[in-house]
Amino acid sequence: MEGARHRIRIRALIIAVVLGLVGAGGAPAEARVSPGPVVDIQSAAWLAPDGQSMTVQVLASCPERWTVGEAVVAVSQPQASGQASFPLTCIGSLRMFSVVVPSTGGTFELGEAQATASVTIERGKTERAQDSQLVQVQPAVFVELANTARLESGGGAVLIDVTVACPVGATGQASYVNVSQGQTSGNGTYVPVCDGQEHTFTVRVQASRGAYQVGDAQALTFANIGHEGIGTAGVDDGPIQVVA
């Protein structure tokens, strides 16, 4: 679904990040130059629907005027592994990086993975920082709304396509599409199929008030899935055209 308005709802550990940015004196870390390279892997990663990559979040920093020699994340599971670099620059403050790590062989799966992040910097000498931990691999959801919706029932409803993909092992849950046009609005429902493949659902959106007409409208969808008692969703929204 390249070029599409794909979004992944990632539950970023914002509180942990904020706490990490606050020093013992209560001043933000970005106000001080870090004494050396720092790298910290977050506890969760997100698996792409096809299992060919996972996204790992890393906090990293290095002092100003140093040069980054290497900034990489490696992940491994018994059946698959991979490595990717991330664009760290030395500005003296912590930043969050979402690193997409492709598999170099095999397919990543939900569950656990060993993740290692390392940073090497140079300025007359070389310094290095590394962090390694077991991360929980959670499902990511990709979703795309069609650009058009077709009138039905004399404007009492519209039909719109939604394409969704989610990883093997996750479970699709009740999801919805909203289409609004002026004072007219309505919802339709569907349930994602999580098998690593793209599935397109033609969703009937019944107007709860008013009637749809040919012309501009707005659409929004939440594609909901669950895994081991934890729910997540893919979101897409944007302008569409209602056609006859």
Image: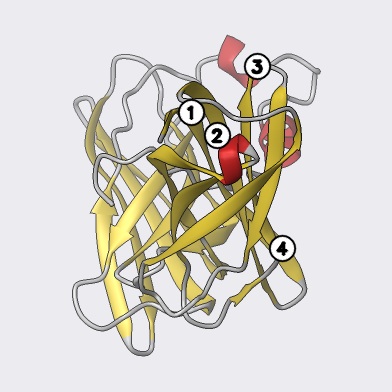
Q: Amino acid at mark 2?
A: Ala
Separation of marks 1 and 2 at Cα, in angstroms = 6 Å
Total of numbered circles in the picture? 4
Q: Amino acid at mark 4?
A: Gly
Q: Earlier in the sequence, mark 2 or mark 4?
A: 2
Q: Earlier in the sequence, mark 3 or mark 4?
A: 3
Q: In the rendered image, which residue does mark 4 sit on?
A: 231
Name the residue located 44 percent from the left edge and 80 percent from the top edge. Answer: 195
Question: What is the crowding at mark 3: few (fewer than 14 residues within 10 Å), some, or many (at least 20)?
Answer: few
Separation of marks 3 and 4 at Cα, in angstroms = 32 Å
Question: Residue 194, relative to residue 14: is it above or below?
Answer: below
Q: Amino acid at mark 3?
A: Gly
Nearer to us in this view, 110 or 72:
110
Q: Position of residue 9 (x, y in %)?
A: 58, 46
Name the residue located 66 percent from the left edge and 30 percent from the top edge. Answer: 211
Q: In the rendered image, which residue does mark 3 sit on?
A: 182
| Element assignment for label 2 | strand
Q: Nearer the viewer, mark 2 or mark 4?
A: 2
